[in-house]
Image (cartoon, grey):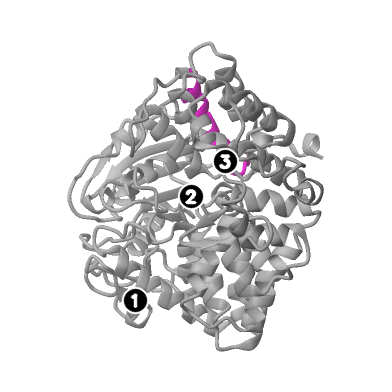
Amino acid sequence: MSNYLTKIGVRTRKAPQTEAIPGREREMTRNNAGGVAFTADAWIRLERWLLLGSEGGSYYVSEADLTKQNVANVRAAIAEDGERAVKMIVDVSVAGRAPKNDPALYALALAASSADAKTRERALAALPQVARTGTHLFQFVAFIDGMRGWGPALRKAIAQWYTAKTPVDRLGYQLVKYQQRGGWSHRDLFRLAHVPMNDAVARWITGAEYGEHNVKRYAGKNLLREDHYPALNSELPVIMQAFEQAKQADETTVIRLVREHGLTREMIPTEHQKSAAVWEALLEKMPIGAMLRTLGRMGACDLLAPFSDAAKLVTNRLGDRELLRKARVHPIDVLKALLVYQAGHGDKGSLSWTAVPQVVDALNGAYYQAFQFVPATGKRFFLGIDVSGSMTMGRVAGFAGLTPNMGAAAMAMLIARTEPNHFIGGFATQFVDLKISASDRLDAAMKKCQRNFGGTDTTVAIDYAQKHKYAVDAFVVITDGETWAGDQHTSQALESYRRKMGLDTKLIVINMVANRTRITDPTDAGSLDIVGFDTSVPTVMHAFLGGSPEFPEEEAA
């Protein structure tokens, strides 16, 4: 193992966090709290924003200002290296590392509006990879419409998004599941992109044959009855035929259409969406992501109840690691489902339900399963969770119910569940044992972190370990990065700890907000800056810490 003690160099004079480290002024900048930290380069900031977004802002900076900062940085990264920027956008989106795809779509729209022709070409070529659903496409169009004109290249890219959906049933599914968003519809895009209108699907979308001028003629009638429109039955994909049939169908017929043709909730008329029998049919083949979003609805219609077959099916699915992996379920999706379902009511409307304890337990377990699995490193972890006032404001990755300190607790629990040798505490301007254990449920751990000890000093976790002579292999600091209250910088506290303890201790800082600074020293090979709720966090940490395999080498071989 490399000895970082030999790489530290001349010890620097301690500097308060409101000032730069002497001799390193050019590498540092002022953060949003008034402290000074190392400047995060354009690529670190781009990755943070793709993973966390800027919805909700933070304690020190509004959502609008944080978005401005990040958009300016995205533009700078694209201008510096358009190919690298597009690749990062695609990699984050395709791997499902981010809880929301909107930042990736916005960044792709910026790249597709670049002054560089090759960057525009690469971005538009990547559209099907980043905009994988009709909703994604609408969002991309809403972003790009205000950035550039509808030239031939953009029209071609949008048209190819549709024409590449083969067989035509794939396109039909997108058309009836994702019908419109943000004021955009498939009809709008077909007309703007000049998608060829040479088949029944295109005519159905635009209303040129089956829609607008026939509405009055067939009002209240089933458009798919052969005595009205025989061509519609024979030419449209089956899923679209079933969608049209469901508009005028009774409950029994809707249930049959769901089971025979795979209609989803979005394709079901509103009047049938309160039926437990309809939801039972929907649940049979429902994707796990949709299941997470609709647990409350299933509870409200009394389908998801104690001892019910539905509750058993839901818990079994939530415990299926391979199913979660294939569906690319993100940990924040699970956390959101947990917090909403456990509350017993929705944020809006009058829906209410009684949470089934076994489902709540299964959601807790699914959160850990949603991250990439790696064996324990066997290292000694000292986890410091930022519980200062700034961590109680804003929201993580746009989720209104998840503040940075709650998210930090959830990230700490991930490490605690994976690594048996750990200690967890909270810090602001002092360090406190939060009494969190690996056996705590997520809601309990998050509640323990909803405390406010005052200002932010990320060095106190390291100082606490040094004072008590704790031998630590890795400090993990989970924070919004807005540190300012200490009399030395985190890198200096780490330098002091390594010298006094004689250890090659590493530092991992997990950022919960997409801001412009970093706490870790970019010249220190023993420090790592990563982004909270990146699904690859366990894998990255494992590689950085040089974790040993779970089994002896000869057995693993």
The kind of residue on which mark 2 rests is: Phe
The image quadrant that residue 24 belongs to is: bottom left
> In which quadrant of the rendered image does the N terminus lie?
bottom right
Percent position (x, y) of residue 524?
A: 47, 67
- Quadrant housing residue 62: bottom left
Disc 3/disc 2 C-alpha distance (Å): 49 Å
The three-letter amino acid code for the residue at tag 3 is Gly
Is residue 369 covered in magenta? yes
Label 2: few (<14), some (14–19) or many (≥20) C-alpha neighbours in 10 Å: many
Judging by the rendered image, the residue that carries numbered circle 1 is 28
| Dot 3 or dot 1, earlier in sequence | 1
Front residue of 204/381: it is 204
Q: Crowdedness of circle 3 by 10 Å Cα count: few (<14), some, many (20+)?
A: few
Left or right of 186 on screen, residue 437: left
> What residue is pinned by disc 3?
220
Circle 1: element type: strand
Say whether residue 525 is left or right of residue 122: left
Q: According to the image, label 2 marks what residue?
A: 533
Which region is colored magenta? 358-376
Of circles 3 and 2, which is in front? 3
Amino acid tagged 1: Met
Real-space CA distance between mark 3 and mark 1, rounded to the nearest whole angstrom: 68 Å
